[in-house]
Image: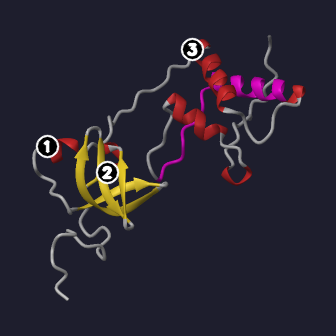
Amino acid sequence: MQSRMPDDYQIPDDPDGGRMDAAFLRSCLGIRAKPGEEPPEFPLAVRRAHYDMARSLSILGALGHGMTPTQLATVVALAIRDGVEPQEDEDPGYSIIPMVEAGQVEPGQKVIIHWRNKDRPAHFLEAIGDRIRVLCEGDERNIRPDLVRLPEEGEFPEFAENVNEPSGV
């Protein structure tokens, strides 16, 4: 079958309109940009597979606000069949677990968690299996270790360095 994809076709990525196809495909294929950079162009096979799938769904009247996860998985499978290789993460991810095991992080110490798409200050409580328990905004939360890091110099200065220290007031 010959694709009718226009040369300038771009996969839609409109969070306000509910169409996040490009973001989901970037995650599945490992095509990510570093913070502050423009995301790289999708390979031709990915754009062609997405266009053909979207066109077929549109003809059938089955395309609403973006594709479903199953439809996007089909786009990924078609792109891989056409020679696209999913990229592996260069950075295996940050994990605070080795620091906890070495005793470099003490209970009550300030940490930064990435939660609800934002970096937030929290206090480390304990490591429980493959999770880190933190105190964030008055609630205890179990967070994946790759979403917890030590604060950089001057980050969230209004937040206490250690919840166990006297406040000095």
Q: Gap in Å between the C-alphas at discs 3 and 1?
A: 42 Å
Q: Secondary structure at mark 1?
A: helix
The image shows residue 60 at horizontal and vertical percentages of 88, 25
The image shows residue 67 at horizontal and vertical percentages of 72, 34
The answer to whether residue 47 is visible is: no
Instruction: Depth check: give the residue in front, 14 or 120.
Output: 120
Instruction: Depth check: give the residue in front, 127 or 111.
Output: 127
Residue type at numbered disc 1? Glu
**Label 3 or label 1, whichever comes before in sequence order:** 3
* Label annotation for residue 83: 3
The structure residue drawn at horizontal position 51% and vertical position 34%, both measured from the top left corner, is 31
Q: Gap in Å between the C-alphas at discs 1 and 2?
A: 15 Å
Instruction: Depth check: give the residue in front, 34 or 133.
Output: 133
Q: Is residue 163 above or below residue 130?
A: below
Q: Is residue 87 above or below residue 150?
A: above
Q: Is residue 126 above or below residue 157?
A: above
Residue type at numbered disc 2? Val
What quarter of the picture does the C terminus occupy?
Answer: bottom left
Q: Is residue 73 highlighted in magenta? A: no
- Start and end of the magenta stretch? 36-57
Q: Is residue 77 above or below residue 141?
A: above
The answer to whether residue 162 is visible is: yes
Please name the residue that numbered disc 2 is placed on: 148
Whether residues under marks 1 and 2 lie with C-beta atoms below 8 angstroms apart, the answer is no
**Label 1 or label 2, whichever comes before in sequence order:** 1
Residue type at numbered disc 3? Gly
Q: Quadrant of residue 53?
A: top right
Q: Gap in Å between the C-alphas at discs 2 and 3?
A: 36 Å
